[in-house]
Amino acid sequence: MGTAPLASAVTTALHGAILVVTIDNPPVNALGQAVRQGLAAAMQQAEADAAVSAVLLVGQGKAFIAGADIREFGQPPVPPSLPEVCAAIENCSKPVIAAIHGAALGGGLEVAMSAHYRLALPAASLGLPEVLLGLLPGSGGTQRAPRLMGVKPATELMLSGKPMNAKAALAAGLVDRLAEGTDPVAAGLAYANELLAQKAPVRRTRDIVIANPEEALAALEALKAETAKKSRGLFSPLKIIECVQAAVQQPFDAALAFERAQFVACVASPQRAGLVHAFFAEREVAKVPEAKLAAPRPFSSIAIIGGGTMGAGITVSALDAGFAVTMIERDAESIARGQKNVEKVYDGLIAKGRMTADAKAAIMARYTPSTSYDDIAQVDLVIEAVFEDLEVKKAVFRELDRVCKPGAVLATNTSYLDIEAIADATSRPQDVIGLHFFSPANIMKLLEIVVPSKVSADVVATAFELAKKLKKVPVRAGVCDGFIGNRILAVYKQAADYLMEDGASPYEIDAAVRSFGYPMGPFQVTDLAGGDIGWATRKRRAATRNPAARYVEIADRICERGWFGQKTGRGFYLYPEGARVGQPDPEVLAIVDAERQKKGVTPRSFTEEEILRRYMAAMVNEGAKVVEEGIALRPLDVDVTFMSGYGFPRHRGGPMKWADMQGLPKILADIESFAKEDPLFWEPAPLLVRLVKEGKGFDSLNKAE
Ligand code: 3H9
């Protein structure tokens, strides 16, 4: 037995007649250049060395191979390419066995599919998630997966991007054998020795003939129609289907070349750049200064103050994550309603067949309803979610200060109130932080962690740890009216109001925003959330509003009629008999017209592009101000906020990444031209002006990129 290091990322060791090839490229064994080089060399060694009868591929650490190195996309390719490496593995004249004990994703699964035999251990996770990065499997995955699994299941695997576990992979034909344990070398050697004893032949996936081509093509046509509808505007899903069509219709090598060309086109697409940015940005957001300074405080019990929609949603989220939760309400009636709000969520899941009554009972056993603050004296973490009123919240925090044990983390779920003032209502502002959940809190991924000036670093670290446990995407925000998300939203919503008063109908604006990739436009969102919510905010802000600033009253006119959106059957749209999709309302258009006349506005028309330019410029400009003021740590924090909490299309990478891809000079030029009409609203953010002057993008402020 001897060890010969080829490149540090791949090592080989001869165990009897079996060459064990270990991929060792922490943290996830991504297929960077050194790994590809090492694998190619290992295959040459296996061919050349007469002492080698079989090859075993294994991964070091937690993963088998998590795929191509995502950081290399968009950079000049360095040989050997992954398709070349896969071909070398498949063409090897000696049996190659892959033993998978962890993630075999993307290029990692493509390597495994190029091997002649595959073994999976219980913790294996196999998938082709390229579509989530705007890509397609580009190393033969679109050719080999259909041969191993069948055309339809393979295409569905690639279109969903979801991984499967070892058992499912065996059932799907993706692996040949399951083994127990966690050691891929031991299990792989046992399997390889067995194959050698049987004189098992080299078995190349490329040689498998795809059965029933007509049936396969018909299934692909059906998937194509479905996908065109579902993946609105996405580039790579349809390309995946075309590659599988090629797998059915063309010889292997020709179809492989077709796949390569489509992969290269995907890499070049802005959607790939946006989605890869999203992938890294979502991991970067948790890297905040406080997390480096302090460890989180230990916590296992949580109290939620308030059993309304928000309080109940947060309770469900915490229960789902395994915490013991005490809910506090002011009286017996309110707490009964709070419990009902929680149970409603689980009953909905039971009705849909997604949960059993027993599972609900097990979860509810960790839930304690109470009307006495004394019951939460020993909890580790409290989240207040009562009525959005500063005095009400201060009273709650005074009570928490009275009862809670020293060191308990005290969080408020306010969406715009001054957290400094709430913290100062206690004798322990160092323990007070903002946790801004989004509704429905058990579903929405975004959690704004709002950091007031006196909070201690370990409380911030605890909030990030909580986000991880709740499977939320945390974004650190500073204190200001609206924090990151709602502050920027208020500004681009205003741009939408101006467009409406100037001549675009709310329906045209919504359609333009949907065409950009949002699931809904701003007026649809208002109708969904309830027009009364924004109306209350506008009334609250009326006293501090700059009298010189333009103010559009159309939404107020609509609210004055009691038209609050879906819940009242009409808002900007009509919702006959509880319909969820609204219909344009001629009476709303008449109100819009009347308001224009009152202001002496002669309506003009806007193209979809003109609408979007204003909408997006307002968003980006305010985003730049939020970054410059330190409310967001980096532009990527703004991006993640909007992708995770506001429906911003992920393939565009968030507003700041989108702006970079447009070119900041173009955005600034737009803002300057709009400023001629309204210099107050369209004042360019100093950061934007500076970056344009320096020839830089927002990306230059994202340390990791
Ligand atoms: C592909 O394969 C294309 C091919 O078809 C064709 C090629 C020709 N590259 O998520 P984590 C980093 S496309 C580079 O926190 P977990 C990640 O940024 C690829 N870096 O851990 C993080 O870094 P940091 C298809 C990567 O345990 C660290 O590793 N494959 C890559 O929660 C830990 O990651 C995929 O899309 C990568 N491929 O989850 C799989 N992957 O510590 C993408 C991760 O500096 N990866 N990093 O923040 C995943 O889904 C998860 O990372 C995984 C582990 C499930 C593996």
Image (tube, grey):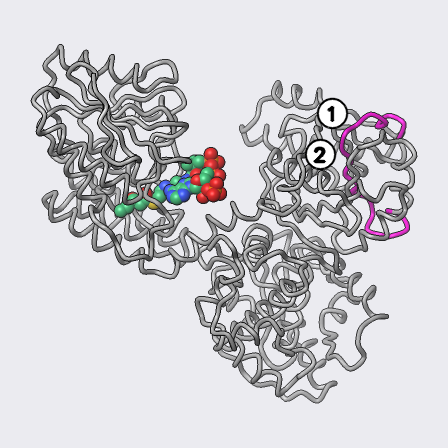
- Amino acid marked by disc 1: Tyr
Ligand 1's quadrant: top left
Q: Which residue is mark 1?
A: 367
Q: Exactly how many numbered labels are in the figure?
A: 2
Mark 2 vs 1, N-terminal side: 2
Find the distance from the CA under tag 2 to the CA under tag 1.
9 Å
| Residue at (88% x, 48% y) in the render | 424
Q: Are marks 2 and 1 in contact (CB under 8 Å)?
A: yes
* Mark 2: few/some/many CA within 10 Å (<14, 14-19, 20+): many
Q: Is mark 1 within 8 Å of ligand 1?
A: no
Q: Is residue 197 magenta?
A: no
Please state the extent of the stretch shown in magenta in the rendering. 372-393
Image position, residue 677 (x, y; %): 63, 86
* Vertical comparison of 470 with 497: above or below: above
Q: Which residue is mark 2?
A: 315
Image position, residue 64 (x, y; %): 34, 30
Q: Secondary structure at mark 2?
A: helix
Q: Is residue 210 visible?
A: no
Q: Is residue 279 left or right of residue 136?
A: right
Hey, which quadrant is residue 344 in on the image?
top right
| Residue at (70% x, 42% y) in the render | 460
Hey, which quadrant is residue 23 in on the image?
top left
Q: Is mark 2 within 8 Å of ligand 1?
A: no
Image position, residue 224 (x, y; %): 30, 50
Q: Is residue 7 left or right of residue 364?
A: left
* Vertical comparison of 393 with 322: above or below: below
- Per the rendering, the mark at residue 575 is none
